[in-house]
Image: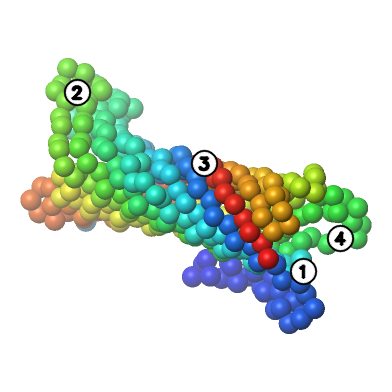
Amino acid sequence: MRIILLLAFISSPFIYSSSNLLADDNATIKNTFSLEKGRKQGFFTYQIGGLVTDSAGATRLHFPLSELRFPLNVDTVQVSYLLQKSDWRLSMTYQENIDSDAGHMEDRDWGVNYLDDPNSGASLDSLDIYSESRSRLSSQEWSIEVDTKLQMKSVDAFLRLFPIHLGVGLLGQEYRYNTFDLVQSYPSAPLQQIDKVDGKVLSYRTKLLLPYISIEIEPQIHRSLNFNLKFMFSPLVQISDYDNHILRDKQSWGETDGLGFLMQMDLGWKMTSYFELFVLFNYEHVQSSGQQIQESLESGSLERFKVHLEHISEQYNAFAGARISF
């Protein structure tokens, strides 16, 4: 609901003006379709710890107590559409990964030995358990944005050389993981035997929703070159996730909200008036906090509690592709 209200507030002047524009039959319409192949690199992390609440009350633990870091290292394909009418643009994108081997998921636990026995001399900062598992990823990403060219008579000469677009948009991302073949070590007890478990050990899925505002600068470098630099800020990121620890018979559900920053650089070479080759680079950083609910049957009876949760995501994307306009 908060996202809907925020988007309605920010985009209302855009919608009003663009509705008047669409009624203008004299405006020139330009359609652009693009197809690009790329590589995504990065990670998505969740951390838990801090305040823990169950039926017996609340306990404050150290943070982070546990961290799961999921890799985002896959090849991707993306399709895009851009509609231009006068100074207004509507853009849409859809992206999927085309290989599923994302790398190794890493699981870390700190201060476990101290919690088991505070008198043992163990430290809360000690990394006591570390594991890796092969991860397979299925991901989808989509976006929709509307923007308009900035018009200011006082800086008209500057804007002719450096056109600026202001916009609002919505970005959605979904990642679904399955992890296999656990290898677990104990860094604080290096002589302890390493544990190995073959087969599926964990499944995880997360959804991100990022409403954002954007500013794009389009320097006029050369008539055969297109260069765009865009900055996007999301003031109300919302993330939900589900974690199924198969080996421990434990399930977790989490919800967080926070902030996101994105940057995009696009460089295109016009081969003809309607055909263009281009490279595209993206950067994204998201950080949010909230709460996770866990249910476990590990002890033989159902245990349910809440714990503080934080999400951190950072990724880089590089694409090469082609555009056709008419």
Quarter of the image that includes the C terminus: bottom right
Residue 86: x %, y % from top left: 77, 69
What is the three-letter code of the residue carrying label 1?
Ser
What is the three-letter code of the residue carrying label 2?
Ser
Label 3 packing within 10 angstroms: few (<14), some (14-19), many (20+): some
Question: If you read the primary sequence from the N terminus, does the residue marked by circle 1 or circle 4 appear first?
Answer: 1
Question: If you read the primary sequence from the N terminus, does the residue marked by circle 4 or circle 3 appear first?
Answer: 4
Question: If you read the primary sequence from the N terminus, does the residue marked by circle 3 or circle 2 appear first?
Answer: 2
Which label sits on residue 152? 4
Q: Nearer the viewer, residue 66 or 130?
A: 130
Report, in whole angstroms, how far the alpha carbon at label 2 lies from the one at label 1. 72 Å
Q: Nearer the viewer, mark 2 or mark 4?
A: 4
User: What residue is shown at x 51% (from left), y 67% (from top)?
Assistant: 2
Q: Is residue 139 left or right of residue 192?
A: right
Which type of secondary structure does the marked residue at label 1 adopt? loop
Asked whether the viewer can see residue 130, the reply is yes
Question: If you read the primary sequence from the N terminus, does the residue marked by circle 2 or circle 1 appear first?
Answer: 1
What is the three-letter code of the residue carrying label 3?
Tyr
Residue 272's place in the image compared with 11, above or below, is above
Q: Which residue is mark 3?
A: 316
Which label sits on residue 86? 1
Which type of secondary structure does the marked residue at label 4 adopt? loop
Residue 66: x %, y % from top left: 31, 38
